[in-house]
Amino acid sequence: MGLFERYLSVWVGLCILAGVALGNVLPHVFEALAGVEVAQVNLVVAVLIWIMIYPMMVQVDFASIRSIGARPKGLIITLVVNWLIKPFTMAALGWVFFRFLFADLVDPQTAGEYIAGMILLGVAPCTAMVFVWSQLTEGDANYTLVQVSVNDVIMIFAFAPLAAFLLGVTDIVVPWNTLVLSVVLYVVIPLLAGVLTRRALSQPDTTARLDALLTKLKPYSMVGLLATVVLLFGLQAGTITSQPLDIVLIAIPLLIQTYGIFAVAYLAAKWWQVEHAIAAPCALIGTSNFFELAVAVAIGLFGLHSGAALATVVGVLVEVPVMLSLVTIVNRTRW
C-alpha cells in the first residue's frame, strides 16, 4: 500500500473541508455544476464515478461469471441484508430517534418527513460506488458485478411496494427515468468500456498489458474519488452551514444503521466461511444506499425543500466517508 492509499482517510477529510469551503466561497460554480443533470442524476458525478469504476470493469471476465452459481453464499447474504433486514431496521431507527429520543428537538411533521427520507434510503440499495469500495478491498470483480446486477433487477420490482408499505402511502411513483439512467450510466456503459478494453489488450497466456494499464489507471481512480468528495460536499455546502443541527440529528441514526448493517453482513460472511474477496463486496453492497434514487423519490413525494429530501441528502454526505472507514476495517481484518 502506497503513501497515498495509507492516508486516504486524511485526504478525504481534507476534501470534505475543501468542498464545504469552496461551496460557500464559490456557490455559483457549484450551482452550475449541480445544473448539469438529467433525471436527478448529476452528469459530472457520473463522469467521476466512471473514472473510479472503470479499472474494476476492465477486470470483469465473463467466462468466469458462469462459475459464480457454485458460490452462492455471498449473494444470499447481500440479498437478505438488502431486502429483508435493512429497510426495516432503517424504519425502526428513524421511528425510535425522531418519535422518542429527538422528539423535543424536532416538530412532529418534520420528524415524520425525516423518517420518510431515511426509509427511502433504506429501501434503495447499492449505488455504483460499491464498485469503488470493492476495488479498494481487492474484491472479486466478477462477483461484485453479479451482486449489483441482481440487486438492480430486484429493485425494479420491489422498491415501490416496499417503500409504500413502510411509508404507509400508496401513491409511490417510481422515477423510472432516474432508475434506468443510473443503471445505464453507472453499470452498462463502464462495463461495456471495460469489456472492449479487456478484449483489445488480451493476449494468450499473459495479462501483462492489462496489468500495466491497471497500474497506470490507479492514481486517476483515487483522484476521481477525492474529486467526488469535494463535489458532493460543495453541492451541499449551503445546507451544511445553514442546518448543522438537523444534519447531525439525521446523521446519528444513519451512522448506527450503516455500521450495524455492515457488522451483520460482514460477520455473517465470516461465520459462513465466505472467502474474503467475496465477503468484502458482499458486506459493502449490503451497507451502501442508492442515494440518487432515494433523493429523486423524496423530492417527487415530499418536495425539494422537505425534511425527507434533506434526510436523503444527509445520506449522500455520510455515504463516502463512512464507506471508506468500512473499507479500512475490511482491509485490516482479512481472513
Image (cartoon, rainbow, N blue to C red):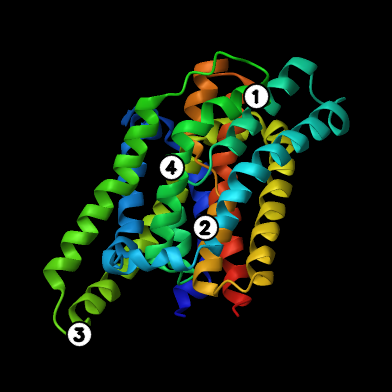
Q: Where 126 sits versus 211, above or below?
A: above
- Nearer to us: label 2 or label 4: 2
Earlier along the polypeptide chain: callout 3 or callout 2? Answer: 2
Per the image, the residue denoted by label 3 is: 206
Please tell me whether residue 73 is drawn above or below residue 33 in the rendered image: below
Q: Is residue 149 above or below residue 176?
A: below
Q: Is residue 50 in view from this perspective? A: yes
Q: Amino acid at mark 3?
A: Thr
> In the image, is 217 to the left or to the right of 261?
left
Q: Amino acid at mark 1?
A: Phe
Q: Amino acid at mark 2?
A: Leu
Helix, strand or loop status at disc 2: helix
Toward which corner of the image does residue 194 lie, by quadrant? bottom left
Residue underneath mark 4 = 152
- Residue linked to disc 1: 165
Secondary structure under the numbered disc 1 in the rendered image: helix
User: Disc 1 or 4, which lies upstream in sequence?
Assistant: 4
In whole angstroms, how far apart are the C-alphas of marks 1 and 4?
A: 20 Å
Say which element carries label 3: loop
Residue found 56% across the figure and 54% down from its top: 78
